Image: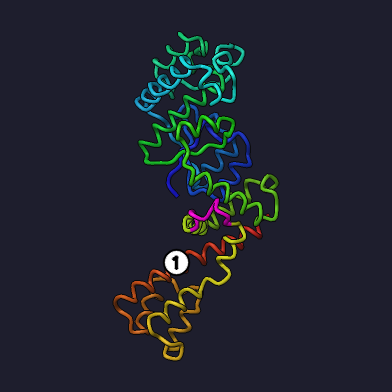
Amino acid sequence: MEPLIYYPTFEPPTDIWLKFSLLYFENFKPIVPYCRQHLLSANFRRVENETDLVTLYSPEYNVGYRASLQAIEEAKKILNNTYERSYLFGQIDVLRNWRNPSNWTFLVCREKFSEEWVYFCESNNIGKRTPDSDGILLPEGLAFLFMTYLAKEIAFIKSAAIITDNNRFDNFTNYSRVTTPTIDNRTRFAKGLFNLLVPKNLADIPFERLIEFRNQNRRLITSFNSELDNVQNKIGNGYTHQDFIDRFNNIYSEFNENILLQGFGIASIPFAAYILIKNNQATTPEYVKEILGSLGIIFGGGYSLSRVLKDKETKRYCKKYITNLGRLR
């Protein structure tokens, strides 16, 4: 799975998304300036310290400056064509909402933007800097707009994708081409799998248990994601969660079939090689070399069989992870 930039908040506002992330994501990067890291919750800080799930990203000035310019350009379009673009934020007149000071309740801290953004918002009466100059107070939709462009700027620099757990502004998110549809589809599919496989509601499982589970199954999570990559084109086209699970009922047959395709009958396979082929652990480099050597394979077919063995290893680890999820309590 490619790197992920998380936005718009420092951390997920509810525990359930973070708990799901512990079971699924390789890593994500929330945008948290260095001097704001003390504001993180105890649970989030524990996840950051005890797992490899979270890597905090502190934006540099130039990143905030470029994001500010992009956000200004987009906000100008909305100011100039209010009724045409208000629907992107689920409203009839979004500018009326933005110019109501009682709606200026969302703080964007000063480390994320440049002075150009503050001047633009104040001169258009759609936000104001805090009395202590700690940041700028904005209406929710405008704050989301700015954080969208900040996330896009960071994602460009880091060659990363973008993810959010805020679906209130999906229309604007889709319009801005922020998130990646394949990642969104995979994430929804994974959530459905976990609802099917994990016997206990994630909300009821303590963070301590999920952190321990992640650390014990870290390699298996990578294999699980690799297998989701393999069926990506099927997700959303009638491919069910049970179809995915059923892929692992017989993960050894493909290798056996490839052995026969190389022209080896079962009777001609040396007993030692046959035992290795059936061995669940026969995917290490040493065993692969021994299997191929026992069959007298050096070129051509050896490459294809080695690839199948590697695929078998990934499927085996994925199957083990599916099994372990079913025992998670």
Task: State the image coordinates of residue 91 (x, y, percent, origin top left).
Answer: 59, 22
Task: Relative to 28, say whether 173 is above or below.
Answer: above
Q: Residue at x 42, y 90 (%)?
A: 268
Residue 291 is left or right of residue 127, and the answer is left
Q: Of all residues shown, which one is farthest toward the front?
A: 84
Task: Left or right? Give the position of 123 relative to 97.
Answer: left
Q: Residue reaching furthest left?
A: 299
Magenta segment, prevailing SS (helix, strand or loop): loop
**In the picture shown, does residue 317 fall above or below 141?**
below
In the image, 166 versus 242, the foreground residue is 242
Under mark 1, the amino acid is Asp
- Residue 235 forms part of the magenta stretch: yes
Q: Residue at x 63, y 39 (%)?
A: 15
State the SS at label 1.
Answer: helix
Residue at image coords 66%, 48%: 202
* Model colouring: rainbow
| Residue at the spot of label 1 | 311
Query: Where does the magenta region start and end?
Result: 231-239
Between 162 and 26, the residue placed more toward the observer is 162
Considering only vertical position in the picture, is 185 above or below 326? above
Expressed as whole percent of the image width and height from the top left, the position of residue 155 reads 40, 37
The answer to whether residue 238 is seen in the rendering is: yes
Q: Is residue 48 magenta?
A: no
